[in-house]
């Protein structure tokens, strides 16, 4: 599938973590592609030490010839923290420490920065360079792999603008991008003496394309409904004036399961939080992001309530609609 995106001229291909490990996936896609950047959007940081993450990222970057974009997040509260048993509180402070340590570890690997026996870190994470290291240092495809950090609201968007190479949002409507998200990234960038142009802004955007418009919307209702029902998306729905629509999704899914979303998710939710419709409609809707989102990550509907064939069809339709 990554090879299809590369052959179709897409700018990058992304995977994210739930059951499957995106670094493992991209270790494989690195073997079937040759030029397209490979992004993790996102890989969970809280369950991995910075040293483990730095090494795993270096593996994929080496295997791909320097094509990895390392997108990281602490993990969604009330979700990955529950299943993994780790803390995700104070995400901004944790992310700042984590990103700083990743870069220090890559510097150390390249023979720079941290002295033998020195400990660096902060309140949440630490790294100690061994005084004696018989294994020496590993080669790196690049000393600095681009780091993108996750954000939905202002605090994390400002942090990403300050410390990251890029910021990754999720289901961000164009109005929210223009009025809240992009200005927050810019504020963080200016704090660090950078311009907004120095920070890539990306967002995973549900995209459901089909020549059958009703089928495109059916698939989008399932994907958008499941995502918008999670507590982290509640502020976005409220900002868009769709809190009641979101609450109806939560109630329907709780009472009757995910398939109830087909009859519950409003057109307003689908249109606010996705690019959905026929190929011509979706190409026009994508244009609405041109002045507020440099890097649109087109996310096909795929949740388990959709069949494997439906998910593959959704992916193929994105390729045929937006490929160059």
Image (cartoon, rainbow, N blue to C red):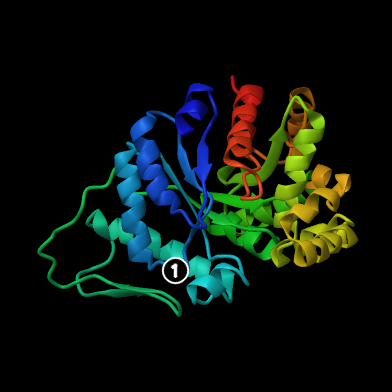
**Camera-nearest residue between 266 and 170:** 266
Q: Position of residue 294 (x, y in %)?
A: 64, 38
- x and y percent of residue 291 in the render? 74, 36
Residue 46 seen:
yes
The answer to whether 290 appears left or right of 313 in the picture is right
Using the rendered image of the protein, determine whether residue 192 is visible from the camera's viewpoint: no
Indicate the quadrant where residue 174 lies: top right
Q: Residue at the left extreme?
A: 134
Residue 140 point in image, percent of width and height: 27, 47
Q: Residue at x 61, y 59 (%)?
A: 191
Measured as percent of width and height from the top left, residue 50 is found at 38, 65
Name, please, the residue furthest toward the bottom: 123
Instruction: Name the residue located 34 percent from the left edge and 46 percent from the top edge.
Output: 60
Quadrant into which the C terminus falls:
top right
- Residue extending farthest to the top is 324
Q: Quadrant of residue 287?
A: top right
Count of marks, rendered view: 1
Does dot 1 land on a helix, a strand or a loop? loop
Please tell me in which quadrant of the rendered image residue 200 appears.
top right
Residue 252 higher or lower than 123, as above or below: above
Most foreground residue, 240 or 32: 32
| Mark 1: few/some/many CA within 10 Å (<14, 14-19, 20+) | some
Q: Which residue is the site of mark 1? A: 47
Query: Is 256 situated above or below 275?
Result: below
Residue shown at 51% from the left, 49% from the top: 165
Q: Residue at x 53, y 50 (%)?
A: 41
């Amino acid at each position: 599938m990554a090879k299809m995106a590369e052959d179709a001229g897409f700018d990058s291909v992304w995977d994210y973590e739930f059951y499957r490990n995106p670094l493992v996936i991209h270790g494989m896609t690195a073997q079937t592609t040759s030029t397209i950047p490979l992004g993790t959007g996102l890989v969970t940081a809280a369950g991995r030490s910075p040293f483990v993450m730095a090494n795993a990222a270096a593996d994929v970057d080496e295997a791909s010839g320097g094509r990895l974009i390392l997108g990281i997040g602490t993990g969604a509260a009330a979700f990955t923290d529950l299943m993994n048993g780790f803390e995700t509180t104070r995400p901004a402070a944790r992310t700042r420490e984590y990103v700083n340590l990743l870069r220090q570890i890559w510097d150390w690997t390249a023979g720079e920065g941290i002295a033998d026996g020195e400990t660096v870190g902060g309140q949440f994470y630490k790294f100690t360079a061994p005084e004696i290291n018989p294994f020496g240092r590993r080669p790196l495809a690049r000393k600095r792999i681009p780091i993108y950090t996750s954000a939905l609201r202002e605090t994390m968007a400002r942090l990403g603008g300050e410390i990251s190479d890029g910021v990754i949002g999720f289901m961000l409507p164009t109005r929210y991008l223009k009025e809240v998200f992009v200005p927050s990234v810019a504020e963080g960038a200016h704090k660090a003496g950078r311009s907004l142009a120095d920070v890539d802004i990306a967002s995973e955007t549900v995209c459901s394309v089909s020549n059958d418009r009703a089928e495109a919307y059916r698939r989008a209702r399932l994907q958008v409904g499941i995502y918008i029902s999670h507590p982290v998306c509640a502020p976005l729905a409220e900002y868009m004036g769709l809190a009641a629509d979101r609450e109806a999704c939560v109630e329907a899914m709780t009472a009757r399961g995910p398939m109830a979303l087909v009859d519950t998710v409003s057109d307003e939710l689908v249109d606010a939080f996705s690019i959905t419709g026929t190929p011509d409609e979706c190409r026009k809707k994508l244009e609405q992001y041109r002045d507020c989102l440099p890097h649109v990550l087109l996310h096909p509907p795929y949740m388990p309530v959709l069949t494997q064939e439906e998910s593959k069809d959704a992916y193929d339709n994105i390729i045929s609609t937006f490929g160059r």
